[in-house]
Image (cartoon, grey):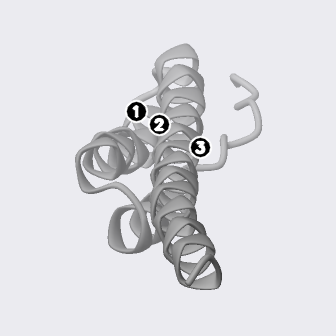
Amino acid sequence: MEVKPTRPNSYLALAIISTILCCLPFGIVSIIYATKVNALYEDGHYEKATSASKNAKTWGIISIAIALLGWLIYVLIFGAALFGILLSEANY
């Protein structure tokens, strides 16, 4: 009898959260990979299931990182604008 390796984590929660709260396109890619993990594992494609798991995690993290970068740029741009307004009003 064949011994099955441990089922890899699907990271579906990470994929869904990153899609809803962060970056939609990359989150969707993460969801697609996450949904493949269990089916591949049950079909006996253990290496492909592990690969899909890693891809789901990677795309979820990329989604969150891009969202954080976007927010950082947003805050810097509007922070600089606000700082400029405050400086110009202080000179009057």
Give the amino acid type for the residue marked by disc 1 in the picture: Leu
Closest to the observer, 49 or 87: 87
Q: Which residue is mark 2?
A: 59
Q: Which residue is mark 3?
A: 61
Q: Which residue is mark 1?
A: 40
The residue lying at 65 percent from left, 49 percent from top is 9
In the picture, the quarter occupied by the C terminus is bottom right
Work out which residue is located at the far front of the displayed protein and give it: 92
Circle 3: element type: helix
Give the amino acid type for the residue marked by disc 3 in the picture: Ile
In the picture, the quarter occupied by the N terminus is top right
Closest to the observer, 47 or 56: 56
Circle 1: element type: helix
Circle 2: element type: helix
Residue 14 in percent (x, y) is at: 55, 61
> Disc 1 vs disc 3: Cβ atoms closer than 8 Å?
no
